[in-house]
Image (tube, rainbow, N blue to C red):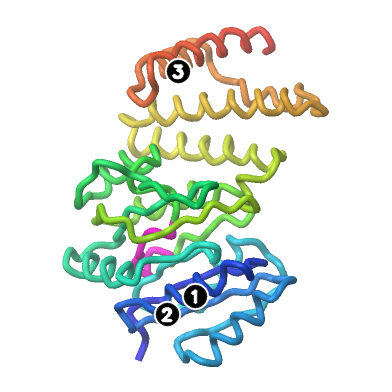
Amino acid sequence: MAPKISIIVPVFNVEIFLNTCIESILCQEIHDFELILVDDGSTDNSGAICDDFANIDKRIRVIHTENMGQSSARNLGISLAIGEYIGFVDSDDYISSVMYSSLYEKIIANNADISVCNFLVGDKDNSFRPFAENVNDMTLDTEAALKEIYTNRILSFSPCNKLYRRSLFDTISFNVSIIYEDMDISYRLISKSERIVYIKKELYYYRYNNNSTLKKAFSLKRLDLYTVRKWMYQYYKERLPEESNNVLALLIVESLLLYRQLKAQGGYSLNNYKYLLQFDTKESIKSITTTKLLSIQRKLITIIQILLYRRLM
């Protein structure tokens, strides 16, 4: 019989973290799951560690591939999954022993499409802090979840603190061409969901990892943030226009940040990246002024930057 849950873990050169990650999954209170370990072309002992675990637990399947990237590894895992529900764990993280039992019970009890838990975020000193504070358990419909997700404050962009109905991925997959694939897929999956349930308890542990993509030195791949936020803005403008002003405000703030980072790095022809500043001045200032997502100080700084950079266009 097919398991209730398929848990997908992309693995790439994480031998120092991998044992803890896999052990935390195998120790789940709920036992009816399959664990799909996608060894994404690891050059350390990660692949061998996956095979060792597969030899002692029949719930584990290991797939060894050439290096494709995390999105491709997740997509491959999804294509092989046979569970009714799908979860993801990053191979340098670990989870509470009751995470999947809690998410599964919640999703079944509420006939939901996605269940979400709070999580703990690791810091350099190995301490952890809650991602969302002063929150309660809640149930959200599609519109309420869409109004929350773009802020990345409670539900979070990450797929790793969630359990998804398998059918959500029938027409949606992780974008393999960008590095902000979690942000990109988050609202798309929610848009296909009728009910999302949230658990305030922190059940997932995000380790601090210096080698993660977004903690490495600046590269042009960071400009994917502009692309993904622009897609998001276009989506909200069409589907949920009352929230599009807030999404535009975030797009403007992040575009200005990216341009400043390019300028600070040096060595780039800034003329090639003026598209980051191509916002209508009047519309931009109105968006920044009226949004409730930014502090007054942040609004003033952003408006000054808009006016200064306007001269470059």
User: The disc labelled 1 sits on which kind of residue?
Assistant: Ile
User: The disc labelled 3 sits on which kind of residue?
Assistant: Arg
**Mark 3 vs mark 1: which is more N-terminal?**
1
Other-residue count near label 1 (Cα within 10 Å), few / some / many at <14 / 14–19 / ≥20: many
Q: Is residue 92 magenta?
A: no
Residue at (48% x, 16% y) in the render? 284
Q: Quadrant of the N terminus?
A: bottom left
Of residues 194 and 211, the one drawn nearer to the viewer in this rendering: 211
The vertical placement of 70 against 19, above or below, is above
Rounded to the nearest angstrom, the CA distance separating label 3 from label 2 is 45 Å
Other-residue count near label 2 (Cα within 10 Å), few / some / many at <14 / 14–19 / ≥20: some
The local secondary structure at tag 2 comes to helix
Which residue lies under the disc numbered 1? 22
Q: Provide residue 253's location: percent of width, then percent of height.
A: 51, 25
* Residue farthest to the left, as pictured: 109
Q: Provide residue 77's location: percent of width, then percent of height.
A: 53, 73
Number of marks in the rendered image: 3
Of residues 159 and 251, the one drawn nearer to the viewer in this rendering: 159
**Mark seen at residue 26:** 2
Q: Provide residue 247's location: percent of width, then percent of height.
A: 42, 31
Q: Which residues are magenta?
A: 159-169
Which residue lies under the disc numbered 3? 298
